Amino acid sequence: MTDEPTNQAPRHVPADLPGRIQHYIGGKFVDSADGDTFDVLEPVTNDVYLQAAAGKQADVDLAVAAARDAFLNGPWPRMLPRERSRILHRIADIVESRDARLAELESFDSGLPITQALGQARRAAENFRFFADLVVAQADDTFKVPGRQINYVNRKPIGVAGLITPWNTPFMLESWKLGPALATGNTVVLKPAEFTPLSASLWAGIFEEAGLPAGVFNLVNGLGEEAGDALVKHPDVPLISFTGESSTGQLIFANAAPHLKGLSMELGGKSPAIVFADADLGAAIDATIFGVFSLNGERCTAGSRILVERAVYDEFVERYAEQAKRVVVGDPQDPRTEVGALVHPEHYDKVVSYIEIGKSEGRLVAGGGRPEGFETGNYVAPTVFADVPPSARIFQEEIFGPVVAITPFDTEEEALALANGVRYGLAAYVWTNDLKRAHNFSQAIEAGMVWLNSNNVRDLRTPFGGVKASGLGHEGGYRSIDFYTDQQAVHITLGKVHNPTFGKGA
């Protein structure tokens, strides 16, 4: 490390931090029915800084009842799309006006670097704005047979949407589900991740100020195996949107099956970045450094496997390792910081255990443990392994931290086999200046999303989701509208009814 900021300097702690967080049910903040709470840690010191209400079956039952009553008897599902859109735009305005405070709290709670947390807060506002516009522009099919019949689609909200969100970029990912669920007229119960409940607790005040009717939004904190499980199994919650790890997704799939719930699940990833010899190496290195080390490496679309053509492999590895060593690790609240503290000591231990495994599977060329000057907190130096075989655990398994595996290849066929040779299929990144190769290779990759000569930037109208163990279904744009609505086909006869005649004899 250079003389960059370290966590030995005086820390910035946000003013007016709450000492406790409650549930929000039927327009009111409430404690758990049994009074139970759980500790919330901040990741730089791992000190407990607040108590959150620990929701269980009884709390989920109350939240679902409030949401169902708001759906059946409240105005929200019956409002015109334009009326709902106005409220969603007000929500976006409020979020935008408070982006600095939201980022400050998110950074403190999750360990995300403050500049990146600020970008996520602004993206949350944009998510609401996007779906506010989309629901007004929504058009459905009409099919006509002149003089005989007309058929049209009547789109309707489904009911109570159960939203279960992760601890990485929590506020933004909550907005990604709340925006379309509310825009289409559903009511919701949100179960945020137990590691990072702070920013989720702000939604209630934002929604009240924007004019969202009571009961439309409900929030239950708690552990996944208690509050999350109760939400998935609740018979009055017809659809679940979940973002998290693949093993949890499998459990949700099984528990939702008896109720035949609608499911949208964005799960884990072990995404490849494939760099061909004709690529712009400087751009590819910059993008792949950012792609795995931004958001502390705690991102589902991280390009955590880099496959490099052998002709440029040695040069790539050397340049990549040197740049990784210069990535600034520091206090999440310091605007100079590029990698902050991992979210929780449990996750820190997992990431460090993979680094130790990697030391016997590949050649360590950068990082490899706790960075110098960071004796406490969940800090991991940006870590790079080269010469990693495809059988290695650090090649096959999702680490979800600032750790990358680099592997050489000789032919396109070998590169494709390496890219597809894992159980995941969320994202992929291809770097080449050969136009035909770019398109043909990209289309052969088993991934829900592919970026060509670019980093993880996306148009919100495009589908977001993965294949294989990386997910079920897609959200984004009209796919989100489809997931959160029922499409009812209505058929009308315009002329004489032409029916086969039964029961009249000869």
Image: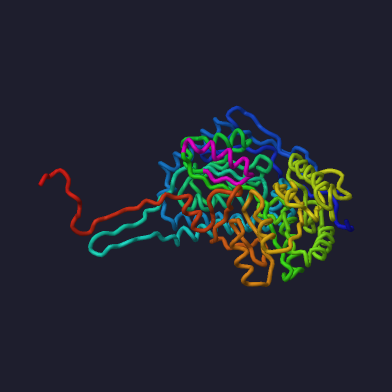
502 vs 11, left or right, is left
Q: Nearer the viewer, residue 67 or 149?
A: 149
Q: In the image, is residue 86 above or below residue 109?
A: below
Residue 302: tell me if it is visible: yes
Residue 43 locus on image (x, y percent): 76, 44
- Magenta stretch mostly in which secondary structure? helix
Residue 144 locus on image (x, y percent): 30, 62
7 vs 259, left or right, is right
Q: In the image, is residue 425 above or below residue 226?
A: below
Q: Nearer the viewer, residue 66 or 330?
A: 330
Q: In this picture, which residue range is highlighted in magenta?
A: 240-259
Residue 59 locus on image (x, y percent): 55, 33
Q: To which quarter of the image does residue 289 belong?
A: bottom right
Q: Nearer the viewer, residue 297 or 332?
A: 297
Q: In the image, is residue 230 above or below residue 359?
A: above
Q: To which quarter of the image does residue 98 belong?
A: bottom right
Residue 96: tell me if it is visible: no
Q: Quadrant of the N terminus?
A: bottom right
Identified at 81% across, 58% down, the residue is 324
485 vs 170, left or right, is left
